Amino acid sequence: MNKIAVGKIPFVDLKAQYSSIRDEIQEAINGVLEDTNFILGKHVKKFEEDFARFCGVRFAIGVGNGTEAITLALKALGICPGDEVITVPNTAAPTAEAITSAGARVVFVDIDPDTYNIDASKIAEKITKRTKAIVPVHLYGQPCNLDEVMRVAKTFNLKVIEDAAQAHGAMYEGKRVGSIGEAGCFSFYPSKNLGCYGDGGAVVTNDKDIALKISMLRDHGRKEKYLHAFEGHNSRLDALQAAVLQVKLKYIDEWNERRRKNAQFYTELLSDVNSVTVPKILTGAVPVFHLYVIKVKDRDALMARLKGEGIETGIHYPLPLHLQPAYAYLGMKKGSYPASEFATEHIISLPMFPELKREQIEMVVDAIREYLG
Ligand SMILES: *Cc1c(COP(=O)(O)O)cnc(C)c1O
C-alpha cells in the first residue's frame, strides 16, 4: 500500500456519512421548511416515539443537547441544591457540569483501569447522607458495569441517570444502555454515533411522571401554552434536527455494526504489536465504539509520529476533571484518582467512524507497529 498516494486519515469523517444519505436528508429538511412546524410539534414527536422504541423504553423527550439532558433528568428526579451526585473524573466535562447546573455537588469516583468506566466497588466509600444519585458514563460507547452500579444504587437508595451520550444503541445484558437506570441521557452532537447537524439531545425513561416532568422542564415549566407550573428551561430539540435524526435512526444499527467490525479489525491487527493495550469488552456488553481507545507507554511520542504520517488521533480526555481549573474548588490534588490520571497520560483514540476502510486501519496499525516494534 502506497502511503503517500492514500493521503491523510481523518479522525472522523462526517462528510462521508452525509454523502451516503444526502437526498433523504434534504427531503426531510424540506419537509420541515414547508410545513413550518419548527418548535416541538409533529417532527419532534415522531422522532421521540421512534427513539424510545429504539432504546426499548416507553418515553423519549427531545432536549437542546446532551448536557441539558443530564441536568433536566437530575432535576426531574428531584435532585436539589445541597445534594451530592457521583460521577467519574474521566469523562467529557459536560457530565459534571450538568450535575452542577442541576444545583448539586459533584463527587468523583475513580475508574476501573481496564474499562475506563466507573469502578463500582469504589462508589460506597464516597456515599454520604447527601448523596442522591449516580451518573455512570458509558464512555467510548462501552457499557459500564451497570449490574454493580444498580446494586450499589439499590443498597443506598440512589437514582441512576445513565450518561449514554457516547453509546446510542449499545447493549448491556440484552438491554439498550439508557434504559436500565431511572433515566438515560443522549447527545446528538454531530460527531456522536447518532448525530444531528447542530446541537440536540434526549432523555429516555420508562417512568411516566419523570417523562412528563422533563417535557415540562424543557419548555419553561409548562404543559399548556401560558400556564407555567414551575420555572424550567428553554431546552427543546428543534424540528429540523429531529427530522435529520429521524433519517439517521434508520441506519444507526448498521453504522454501529460497522464500527464494531472496524474495532475488531484494529484489535486483530494490534494483537501482535508490543505494549499496546486494546479495549476490553465487559461480559454481557455490546459496545458501539464511539471511540477506539488504546493504551501505550509513550503516548505523546506515538501521537506525534502518527501525525507525521498524516494520521489524526485524539485524547479522550487529556486532563481528568478533578484537575481541571473548573473543579479546583473541590480541592482535589494530583494522586486523588490514580486510575483516571494514569489513563489520561497513556490513552490515545485512533481514527474511528463507520466509513473507515480496512486499508486505512491497516495503515494506522502499520504506522504504530513501525514505531513500537
Ligand atoms: C458529548 C457528551 C456530553 C454532552 O453532550 P452535548 O450534546 O455536547 O451537550 C455529555 N457526556 C458525554 C460523555 C459526552 O460525550
Image: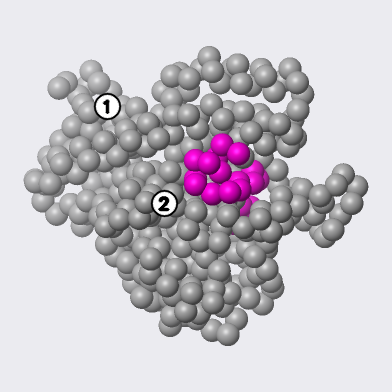
Seen at 77% across and 48% down, the residue is: 219
Secondary structure at badge 1 equals: loop
Mark 1 / mark 2, whichever is N-terminal: 2
**Quick check: 18 left or right of 43?**
left
When asked about the image quadrant of residue 49, the answer is top right
What residue span does the magenta drawing correspond to? 49-70
- Extreme-right residue of the structure: 226
Q: Is residue 222 visible?
A: yes
- Left or right of 369 in this view: 225: right
| Magenta stretch encompasses residue 53 | yes
State the residue position of label 2. 175
Name the spot of residue 43 as percent of width and height, x first: 67, 30
Q: Crowding at label 1, few (<14), some or many (≥20) Cα neighbours within 10 Å?
A: some
Does the magenta segment cover residue 47? Answer: no
What's the residue type where badge 2 is placed?
Answer: Lys
Q: Residue 190 or 39: which is nearer the viewer?
A: 39
